[in-house]
Image (tube, rainbow, N blue to C red):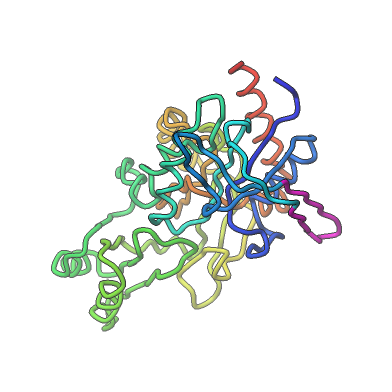
Amino acid sequence: MSSNLKIAFLMDPLETLDLKGDTTFALALEAQRRKHQISFFKPEDLIYSDNNILANICKLELSSSDNLDEFKYHDTFIKPLSEYDVIMMRQDPPFNMAYISATHILEKLPTSTLVVNNPYEVRNSPEKIFVTNFSHLMPKTLISRNVNAIKEFRKKFKDIIIKPLYGNGGQGVFHIVPEDENLNSILEMFFSQNKEPLMIQEYLKDVRNGDKRIILLNGEPVGAINRVPKLGESRSNMHVGGKPEKTELTERDKFICNEISHSLVKKGLYFVGIDIIGDYITEINVTSPTGLREIKNLDSIAIEEMFWDFIENKLKFKT
């Protein structure tokens, strides 16, 4: 195999992203630095035709200097994705039918094209459901639309968090304190929007000290940041103002990583972000985990370099 890989990024349009903090941009920039050919296509550009998987795709050109990140699209053309060595599935949530459709189509690619992460396993591992495979590591959790079950859970744990099962970026997350009278209204709002169950969890006071994002590469932790919620906010997501801070892994963090490692590797979920509050894991992000640029800024750990070292070695051993 040539040392120059052909890599296609399935992702949202770059003009819609905050490139300064974007993990996909960092991964693509490092691939370009290594002289790999990088291309771009959107979920709606996927084409299935007579059992061939194609995309309306274009070459991508990136630059980064003095905190200025820029990109250039070249002309688009329809091309078989089997001609690429790597497909990076970096489509942002929400985890909806458009996302699921993309996983079904990409799953049909020949094994000579490596899709990261494995689309079959991504489809079967939505963040807030996959983590329940490790319920012994989680806070007390209920997944339901049953109002009585939700009220019983609240009665038992008093202080709770309610969030959409397929949400992202902290959107739609509510902290319901014991004296809060808005539970019925919040449930009505959710139930009027869709037919999906909700995730309800015991509120973890440790979130005030931060929500730790750990990046795992091939099942091994390679970097972490602590995201601290701003004053008056229970959510720590950086999308809603959470402040990234330097952190270290505790023995409990390492134990959690070790507990889930084998499952991640077995499923081909090579690039994963997990969230830990205090002693508990709350989410396993396999769709488009973020945090690389913040980790690099705070810890000088270049996970994007480690990632492409891993991919290059994996493909070399595969041929």
- Compared with residue 50, is residue 71 higher up or lower down, i.e. above or below? below
Q: Is residue 70 magenta?
A: yes
Query: In the rendered view, does 211 fall on the left or right side of 38?
Result: left
| Range covered by the magenta-colored residues | 59-73
For this rendering, which residue is in front, 317 or 15?
15
Identify the residue at horizontal 61%, vertical 34% (top origin).
86
Q: Is residue 62 magenta?
A: yes
In the image, residue 96 lies at what x, y percent? 39, 56
Identify the residue at horizontal 31%, vertical 41% (top origin).
133
For this rendering, which residue is in front, 25 or 319?
319
Query: In the rendered view, does 292 fall on the left or right side of 287?
Result: right
Identify the residue at horizontal 33%, vertical 53% (top origin).
139
In which quadrant is the C terminus drawn?
A: top right
In the image, residue 261 lies at what x, y percent? 45, 32
- Compared with residue 126, is residue 7 higher up or lower down, i.e. above or below? above
Among the 4 quarters of the image, the one containing residue 318: top right
